[in-house]
Image (tube, rainbow, N blue to C red):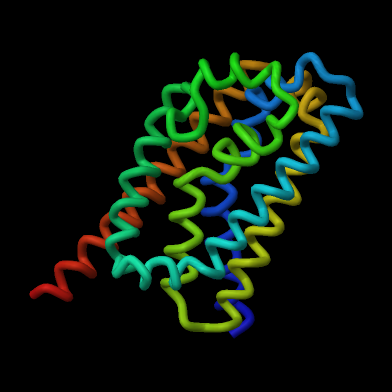
């Protein structure tokens, strides 16, 4: 049981971490906070990551209720979420800013606003439709209380790492460099594409079995 739960935790944490991809968001975060002092940047990091984590936890807990309200099956969301994640992964593998997360125009317009921790950093940069659909599917795919707790812990752990990534964003960018960030983004994009294909294929197979 311990080995099974450990394996499940590794899978879930890796999947959520890849979807959130905090390292890939460092460049955007630095761009949005470039005119701020060190203290202001850290305050934005804390607020935005906290908001993103709360949103992700909310949809993880209330996701099934929302699906039932609109009569949407978990498998339908698997297919839709998989397609969405693949489009994000495609952008990441080409080292482009995902259109699902934030556009170049939004970055430019947001630099003069004081509430960038809400939009676009908290939502949708950190917790966009891809993250929301992923956590809903994960919670809806298990009936085990232990595994549901593991999913919630994985979400919290991912955003704790995200917080420290943003707090030390300028040091990380200086250490890794722009080329290093591109390599990491492409690697995360490849893993995300594999996750997207897995979600979509499972959803299609389950839908086919239900209708046959």
For this rendering, which residue is in front, 56 or 170?
56
Report x, y in % for residue 116.
Answer: 68, 30
Q: Quadrant of the C terminus?
A: bottom left
Q: Residue at point 20% right, 68% down?
A: 207
Q: How many marks?
A: 0
Report x, y in % for residue 19.
Answer: 52, 46
Give the left or right position of residue 171, taking residue 50 as reference.
Answer: right
Give the left or right position of residue 212, taking residue 66 as reference.
Answer: left
The quadrant in which residue 35 appears is top right
For this rendering, which residue is in front, 102 or 17?
102
Residue 176 in sight: no
Report the residue that reaches farthest toward the right: 39
The quadrant in which residue 185 appears is top right
For this rendering, which residue is in front, 70 or 172?
70
Residue 14 in sight: yes
Determine whether 41 is above or below 35 in the image.
Answer: below
Report x, y in % for residue 36.
Answer: 83, 19
Give the left or right position of residue 57, taking residue 102 as reference.
Answer: right
Q: Residue at point 68% right, 27% down?
A: 29
Q: Quadrant of the N terminus?
A: bottom right
The quadrant in which residue 30 appears is top right
Q: Residue at point 68% right, 18% down?
A: 111
Report x, y in % for residue 95.
Answer: 48, 22
């Amino acid at each position: 049981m311990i080995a099974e739960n450990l394996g499940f935790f590794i899978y879930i944490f890796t999947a959520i971490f890849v979807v959130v991809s905090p390292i890939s968001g460092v460049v955007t975060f630095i761009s949005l906070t470039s005119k701020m002092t060190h203290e202001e940047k850290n305050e934005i990091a804390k607020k935005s990551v906290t908001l993103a984590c709360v949103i992700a936890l909310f949809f993880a807990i209330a996701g099934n209720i929302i699906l039932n309200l609109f009569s949407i099956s978990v498998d339908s969301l698997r297919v839709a979420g998989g397609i969405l994640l693949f489009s994000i992964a495609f952008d990441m593998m080409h080292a482009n800013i995902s259109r699902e997360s934030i556009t170049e125009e939004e970055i430019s317009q947001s630099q003069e606003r004081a509430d960038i921790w809400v939009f676009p950093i908290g939502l949708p940069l950190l917790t966009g439709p891809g993250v929301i659909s992923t956590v809903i599917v994960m919670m809806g795919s298990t009936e085990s209380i232990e595994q549901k707790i593991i999913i919630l812990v994985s979400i919290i752990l991912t955003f704790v790492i995200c917080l420290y990534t943003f707090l030390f964003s300028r040091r990380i960018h200086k250490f890794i460099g722009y080329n290093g960030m591109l390599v990491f983004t492409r690697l995360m994009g490849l893993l995300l594409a594999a996750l997207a294909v897995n979600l979509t294929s499972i959803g299609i197979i389950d839908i086919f079995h239900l209708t046959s």
